[in-house]
Amino acid sequence: MDQTVQTDTPDDTPSFGAGHTNSTDLRRIRSNPDFWYPVAWSKELKAGKTIGTRYAGTPIALVRPTEGTVFALEDRCAHRQVPLSKGKVCGQSVQCCYHGWAYGRSGRCIDVPYLGKGKLPNGVRTFPCREQDGLIFIFPGDPDKADTVPLPPRLARVGDPAYKTRFFGQEVKCHYSFMHENLMDMNHQFMHMKQMGQMRPRFLGQKREPGLVEAQYSFARTSGKQPLGEALIFGERRDSSEKFQHRDVMTIRTEYPYQTLRIQTGDEDPVMDLWIVYVPQDAEELTNRTFGLLSVKRPKVPGVLELAWPFLVAFTERIFAEDREIVELEQNAWRELGGDHNVEVFPVINALRALLAECGVSEPAVNA
């Protein structure tokens, strides 16, 4: 790591709490649209069909022709603003369900059944669209930048036969920054004691680069039994004895706007590799849809992971449910208090908050 930091070391990174002078309310920072965001799972969109989805309040129609790649249009017919996702896919176009206006993948209106071809109206907005590793991504920002901004190079360990990958996610009623903070700060394992037993995290240090914050931790179990789901991830049963203390290193990274988490021992391949992103749904960005891919390394005994997979899924669902409940409580407190009153003392979270503020888009000032 570039820098080792103790959790009790004073830190001068701005905390963005409402009680600080000249502070920025992080929960009012909008996501930067000039990145690739997933808006649907590939399996949700069948050939010859269209579905509606959203990014930060913008309705988006995803269209999969029977031949050719997926394309994305603003989900409003130019005529009466009816959702195009309610329409019918015809060849390389989608036809509005109301009056039959048709739009091609360029967004141009290519047919109005009761008009001549020379009288066609303007079309609708289109979004650059790509498909990778079971996800459909759009580029909601400046389309001229789409070819210069790469998709994330690898989503967990999808396609690697040495791993089994779980695709998961659901809607969470909070600003995306709460999700980044929750995953990055492993001191909140206190909350998961019922699921995981009592764990003592050790913060090993942080790395801060442009567009990136990374933290590393190790853990020691101080009481309670190892849950079956955790045993499946590590491929072995572990107790609280000394030989298992601080043996593995967990590396968590926010590389804006995505987050990753890996657990590994020494130079071995990770036993777990997570890729996750939180896509704002409403215009205020106080609700997000989570898209996560969790890859678990297969144990040496063939078939064991497949047999035990339902137990691992149940374990991770319980952990995620606790996290979802707590971040939604944080969001509710923000609403009731009228702003961000959090008092942050952990250095890596202050660095993360600064990163999210720098990479995001400030809310426009309201004229008095």
Image (cartoon, helix red, strand yellow):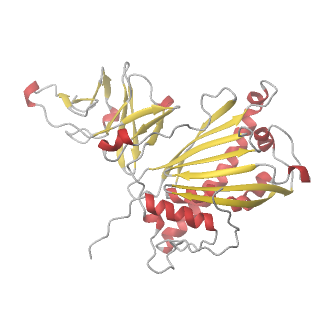
Please indicate whether residue 195 sits to the left or right of residue 348 in the image.
Answer: right
Residue 185: in sight, yes or no? no
Residue 139: in sight, yes or no? yes
Counting labels gives 0
* Residue nearest the observer in this picture, 127 or 99: 127
Please indicate whether residue 3 sits to the left or right of residue 137 in the image.
Answer: right
The image shows residue 111, relative to residue 341, as above or below, that is: above
* Residue nearest the observer in this picture, 34 or 276: 34
Residue found 16% across the figure and 28% down from its top: 112
If the image is split into quadrants, where does the C terminus sit? Answer: bottom left
The image shows residue 367, relative to residue 89, as above or below, that is: below
Residue 22: x and y in percent read 43, 78
Task: Pick out the residue farthest to the front.
Answer: 2
Residue found 56% across the figure and 53% down from its top: 254
If the image is split into quadrants, where does the N terminus sit? Answer: bottom right
Residue 179: x and y in percent read 56, 56
The image shows residue 203, relative to residue 120, as above or below, that is: below
Residue 113: x and y in percent read 16, 25
Residue found 52% across the figure and 72% down from its top: 14
Please indicate whether residue 327 sits to the left or right of residue 337 in the image.
Answer: right
* Residue nearest the observer in this picture, 333 or 210: 210
Quarter-of-image position of residue 352: bottom right
Residue 289: x and y in percent read 50, 47
The image shows residue 348, relative to residue 71, as above or below, that is: below
Task: Pick out the residue farthest to the right.
Answer: 241
* Residue nearest the observer in this picture, 165 or 47: 165
Residue found 81% across the figure and 54% down from its top: 246
